[in-house]
Image (cartoon, helix red, strand yellow):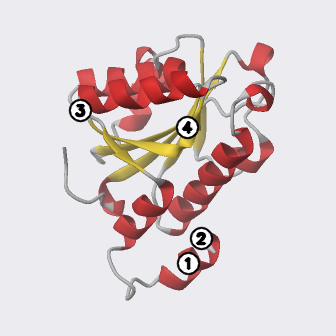
Amino acid sequence: MSYLSDASRSTLLIVDLQEKLMPVIGDGQQVLRSAVLLAQAARLLSIPVIGTAQQPLRLGRTVAAIEGLLDQTIEKSSFDACTQPQFIAATENGRDELVVLGCEAHVCVLQTVLGLLHRQRRVKLVSDAIGSRQAGDKAAAIERARAAGADIVTSEMLMFEWMRNSEHPKFREILKLIK
């Protein structure tokens, strides 16, 4: 477990928030709202935002609300994004804290989290910005990620940690996003 998240050490990883997948995700609109909020905050704080897309010809493109907030999108067929050399290269950017969100929590998100942890990376899993078709699958994914060594956070918790205090130059802008 680690101390507070640090914006200067963070990279935001958005896993498979795709057009054909999101309509079947439990609380999908809330997951998407939290993901957009975090991606907007990351942009304000100069945090890199990397997306993945699982078989985009089958599952569609990244949803429009997220697509424009990504620095890059990595297409994949493996559930664990870490099997993609392009993904590993993108995450080896001098930042050692990887903040993960997306869908499905118990498949691509969890396997990517476990892949990152296996590679000795610091991982924070955003519990209100992940989703699965079934609530039980999401809960099991969170517990397994925690047991494997990931820190479990919420989007709001993370944004306040990134800023550290109300004197942060972007505090008012991020507060507007939250409210």
Q: Which of the 4 image quadrants contains residue 110? A: top left
Q: Is residue 70 above or below residue 91?
A: below
Q: Are marks 4 and 3 in contact (CB under 8 Å)?
A: no
Q: Which mark is residue 6?
A: none
Lower position in the chain sequence, tag 4 or tag 3 = 4
Describe residue 165's horizontal placement relative to residue 70 as left or right: left
How crowded is the residue under tag 4: few (<14 C-alpha within 10 Å), some, or many (20+)?
A: many
- Judged from the image, the secondary structure of the residue bearing numbered disc 3 is loop
- Judged from the image, the secondary structure of the residue bearing numbered disc 2 is helix
> What whole-number distance in Å separates the C-alpha atoms at marks 1 and 2?
5 Å
Q: Which mark is residue 130?
A: 4
Q: Which mark is residue 175?
A: 1
Q: What's the residue type where badge 2 is placed?
A: Ile
- The residue identified by callout 3 is 149
Lower position in the chain sequence, tag 2 or tag 4 = 4
> What whole-number distance in Å separates the C-alpha atoms at marks 1 and 3?
30 Å
Lower position in the chain sequence, tag 1 or tag 4 = 4
